[in-house]
Amino acid sequence: MRTPLAPLLALAIVPLAACLSPRSAPAPAGAPAGARDAGGVVIVNRPRVAGIVAPGVDVLFAGPLPEVLRGKRVGLITNHTGIDRGGGSTADRLAAPSSGMRLVALYGPEHGIRGTAAPGERVEAGRDEKTGVPVHSLYGETRKPTPAMLEGVEVLVFDIQDVGARQYTYPYTMALAMQAAAEKGIPFVVLDRPNPVGGEIVEGNLLDTAFASFVGMYPIASRHGMTVGELARLFNREYRIGVDLTVVPAVGWKRSQWFDSTGLPWLAPSPNLPTLESATHYPGTVYLEGTNLTEGRGTDRPFEQTGAPWLRADTVVAVMNAMRLPGVRFEVAEFDVRPTAAKYPGQHLRGVRLVATDRGAYRPVATTLLLIDAVRRLHPDDFKWGGSIDRLAGTDRVRKAIEAGTLRELLAEWDRDAERFRETRTPYLIY
């Protein structure tokens, strides 16, 4: 049984200001609940308890509401991952008469409010059965809230679990909603959550804006190591969105923590990321979507394995293990692909499985690109690029480097890109 969080917060062991970045101004003495520091982080004056990690929604309701939300008509951008530490829905908590606000609209991203829509499947508008609140789709005719969708809304709130990779669409749903809120002149509140793959590792290139899309809008690193609250601060300042932004931080989370050390319930952020293991590989294996190798969708281990009918799995595994890449090993795997899958539906494949052996040392972006490079060299007549590879990579240089045999040189350049991004992100870090 989970320990109720509110009584623990009342123990006042460590003040919230202790988990703010040194670059974020601490709360002044006697600051009221809901005051904000210079970087837009709400100072809620909540204590935290050693060993307890709580997402922003728990922090929000552990004391008086910030002024930005008190008594307001609220629109909530969320899905099934918007839950508190005990598994309760953020939508339900905001809709409750005791919440101190009025939930008047819900907005569904890719996969929908309940997270059941398939990747790329259109999300329809409707009404939420549980709360009775109208649901507007942000993955249908528009991905940005229209003025009509925001009619009567006094503040927008965002609460969705991200996975820590640039190619994931939820942060861009957030960014577009921030733009819409800025244009409408209404505040935007992010209820923050831990990055499930930790906040220390930064890897990969900075997106070339010539290749900007809904799987990469801004020049951030492929694996950015930031929370959605930190990304919101960066987007707002670096890319001049200019919304009145409030971030309610999670408490108790350290950048070194992965999701399985937080004590928080894991819910698959999307149908093909069912486990933390799949999310661990995703920042790299997402690049497989841009090839004619399966990325494991439609199998029991999506984003953990790859294959094709023509793949000589034993040879590929031997080549990859001979590289002695840090934190990972490769195994031959046999798996069935469901008939509904986009690649090789209904087939039984013999392929390659990636197994993380040291998450701190493992670099999935470089690992997967080296795997693609090896497969192309071993199967020059069978391997093909897909139409999405340049969008996923945020550049055409990956494809060109692999074709030219210069991938290692490009990866060294990307290491320097990652270090530059570390500097860019520093002022926006909260934890």
Image (cartoon, rainbow, N blue to C red):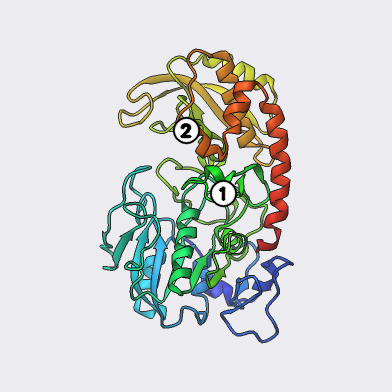
Q: Which residue is mark 1?
A: 164
Kindly identify the amino acid type of the residue bearing the numbered disc 2.
Glu
Residue, x 54% and y 70% (percent of image)? 245
Picture coordinates of residue 351 (x, y %)?
49, 21
Q: Which residue is mark 2?
A: 289
Front in this rendered view, residue 320 or 241: 241
Screen quadrant of the C terminus: bottom right
Kindly identify the amino acid type of the residue bearing the numbered disc 1.
Gly
* 199 relative to 339 in the view: left or right: right
User: SS of the residue at dot 2?
Assistant: helix
The residues tagged by marks 1 and 2 sit, at their Cα atoms, a distance apart of 17 Å
* 104 relative to 256 in the view: left or right: left
User: SS of the residue at dot 1?
Assistant: loop
Specify few, some or many for label 1: CA neighbours under 10 Å numbering under 14, 14-19, or 20 or more.
Answer: many
Which residue reaches farthest bottom?
30
Specify few, some or many for label 2: CA neighbours under 10 Å numbering under 14, 14-19, or 20 or more.
Answer: many
* 115 relative to 235 in the view: left or right: left
Residue 193 has which mark? none
Q: In the figure, 378 relative to 12: above or below?
A: above
Which residue reaches farthest front?
210
Q: Are marks 1 and 2 in contact (CB under 8 Å)?
A: no
Front in this rendered view, residue 264 or 159: 159
Look at discs 1 and 2 and give the one toward the viewer: 2
Front in this rendered view, residue 92 or 418: 418
Q: Earlier in the sequence, mark 1 or mark 2?
A: 1
